[in-house]
Each structure stands twice: as structure tokens, then as C-alpha cells.
Amino acid sequence: MSNESSHPARAADAHRVVVIVDENSNPFELGCATEVFGLRRPEIGRDLYDFRLCSPEPRTLMRDGFFTLTGVAGLEAADTADTLIVPNRPDVDVPRRSAVLDAVRRAHSRGARLVGFCSGAFTLAEAGVLDGRRATAHWQWADAFRDRFPSVRLEPDVLFVDDGDILTAAGSAAALDLGLHLVRRDHGAEVANSVSRRLVFAAHRDGGQRQFVERPMPDLPDESLAPVLAWAQGRLDSPLTVSDLAARAAVSQATLHRRFRAQLGTTPLAWLTGERLALACRLIEGGESRFEVVARRSGIGTAARLRTLMRRETGITPSAYRRRFGSAATATATEGARA
């Protein structure tokens, strides 16, 4: 299987995402990276990333010998990455190649963003870049990870961990969650929503949600949360509470809490807060420059609480978010007001 791993037509200054593919790598997470970072985006009107694959060998046998990957760049391509996605493989006890670990260390030392999907956390930890840092990995390898890397602050029951310049995901679908989180960080909520629509995937699942849910599909149709979620999403500007959600679902708050945990892996309040913050981001991107209005229309309440939530969830203030992702009209108006 040959792969054309770069996009020469893209702008020279585009953010470059490079994936290292090594022997026995998981093809699913490779596919996730390709879907999120590698595809052309005609629906957006521009391409988001310069994407390429690289490998230490000309021919790379993928997990369990499913197929052989050829035609990708050599490992030296990792030295050009702005974001480097490290190899992940199911045989976590097998040491990573020294050349791969050296490439990861070089990328880290020059300030590249490092990403590990699933068992990719083992690669990052073996390279020594996770010491004293927060990370996650697939739940089934949590004990093995702790035993080998006790200096890493493992968070085993979350979808992904954003620790600034190093990000890790629990694996499988969580790789898509982390990928969309990075798109949101780089390009804003509306672009991330567009990418998620093309993927037919949830636009936003908070990284703190549990890796697995007790019952992915409800046993009884009338236990589905879909109707109450749709009802709440249409009323985010109202002072909705968990009690309101429970009343709409015609269940007790305790039962609602159990259903959210079982079906979504989060709490009703956390889901509601996440939906409101996502709406606030879209309002800012759409040109609303008055943060009091953004806070009111998204149901967050006050500009002060908006600042608190945005700093906690996105790492930047509403003003910084507006400068990065707001419309050109908003930016012009803001600069005019400063002048």
C-alpha cells in the first residue's frame, strides 16, 4: 500500500502535521489523523494543515500484518513538524526504535507540539518527555504504564489530556476527540464543527469524560437522552438547570445523572456547560464583540464567568479568542476602538 504523504500545493507557511508510522502501528489511529489533519477542506474554502506520513523504514508492516505501508517520507520529515504524532502499537512492552525516540526528543527540544494516540503515550514516556507531566492512555494499559513510568501523572479514566505542548488520547474514538480538540485550538469552534460534520462525529466531547460508558446503547428506546439534549440545545440562552433537564425527561435528577454517565460518560451539568461554551465560541467567531451579550445569549450569565470558563477550557481569554478566530469585521472594529 503506497501513500502520497504530502500536499505540495498548500501554503508554505501552513501548520505541518507529521505522523511517524512504525512497525506494528495501529491503522485506526493513523486513519483518524489522516481524516482530521490530512484531507482537503473544500467545504471550508481552505486547507487547514500540511500533512505527511513518515517512517524509519521504506516498508512498514502495520499491526498484525494487516498491510504494508510504503511510499512515505523518511524519518527526517519529523524534523520539519509543527505537530508530531508519535507511533502507537498494541505490544506496549516492545521498546521503541532509538531513531524514533531521538526524533521525538528533537521535536520536543525545538518546541514542536507532540501528540500520542492510545499507546502513543508509551512512546512519549520512553522518550523521556512526559516526566512530571499529565497524560492518558488506553484504560487496559493503565497499570502497565504506571509500573514502567511512575514519574508520569497518568489520568487513566479520561478521553484525552491537553498538557499544553504534549497531548495524549485514550485511543480509538478518543483519537478523533483529541484531533477535533486540536482543530478547535488552531482554527476555532466553527471550523472544528465543520470538520466534525464531515466526519459525522460529535463536535465536542470534553477531554475529562470517561473513556468508556456503562451502556453505550440504551436497553429501552424511551431511555435515550436524544430528545432532552435537542430540547436543551435550543434553549441554551435560558437559565436551564439540571432540575429542568430532569423534569423535561420526566425522571428524577438521580436517574438523569445515571443516564448521562451511562450514555455520554459525563454529568448533566458538565454537558450543559460544554454546550454553552461551544455556543459562546461560535458567537465570538460570528462577530459578536460584546462579551456581556455573548455570556447572556449562551446562558453562561456574566462576562466574568465567560472569562473563567474560556480560560479553563481553551487556555485563552475571550479577547484572545476573538483576536484569533473572530471575523474580520470584529477585528477591524476592535482595532478602531483601540485607536
Image (cartoon, rainbow, N blue to C red):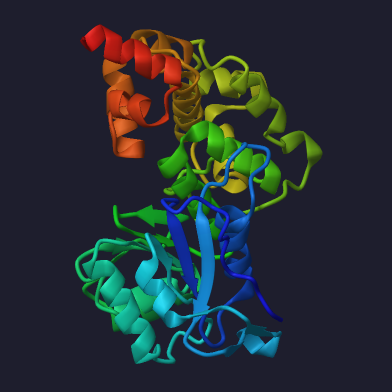
* Picture quarter with the C terminus: top left
How many marks on residues? 0
Residue 291 in view: no
On the image, the x and y values in percent for residue 175 come to 53, 59
Q: Nearer the viewer, residue 269 or 308?
A: 308
On the image, the x and y values in percent for residue 167 come to 37, 59
Residue at the spot x=72%, y=46% of the render?
Answer: 218
Instruction: Classify residue 193 as left or right of residue 11.
Output: right
Residue at the spot x=54%, y=88% of the render?
Answer: 23
Q: Nearer the viewer, residue 164 or 277?
A: 164
Q: Going by the picture, which residue comes out furthest to the right?
A: 221
On the image, the x and y values in percent for residue 118 come to 49, 69
Looking at the rendering, which quadrant does residue 76 occupy?
Answer: bottom left
* Picture quarter with the N terminus: bottom right
Q: Is residue 284 above or below residue 123?
A: above
Q: Is residue 12 above or below residue 339?
A: below
Instruction: Classify residue 261 as left or right of residue 68.
Output: left
Q: Nearer the viewer, residue 190 or 328?
A: 328
Instruction: Classify residue 175 as left or right of residue 300.
Output: right
Residue at the spot x=60%, y=22% of the render?
Answer: 233
On the image, the x and y values in percent for residue 13 come to 41, 51
Q: Nearer the viewer, residue 179 or 141?
A: 179
Residue 317 in view: yes
Residue at the spot x=58%, y=54% of the render?
Answer: 36
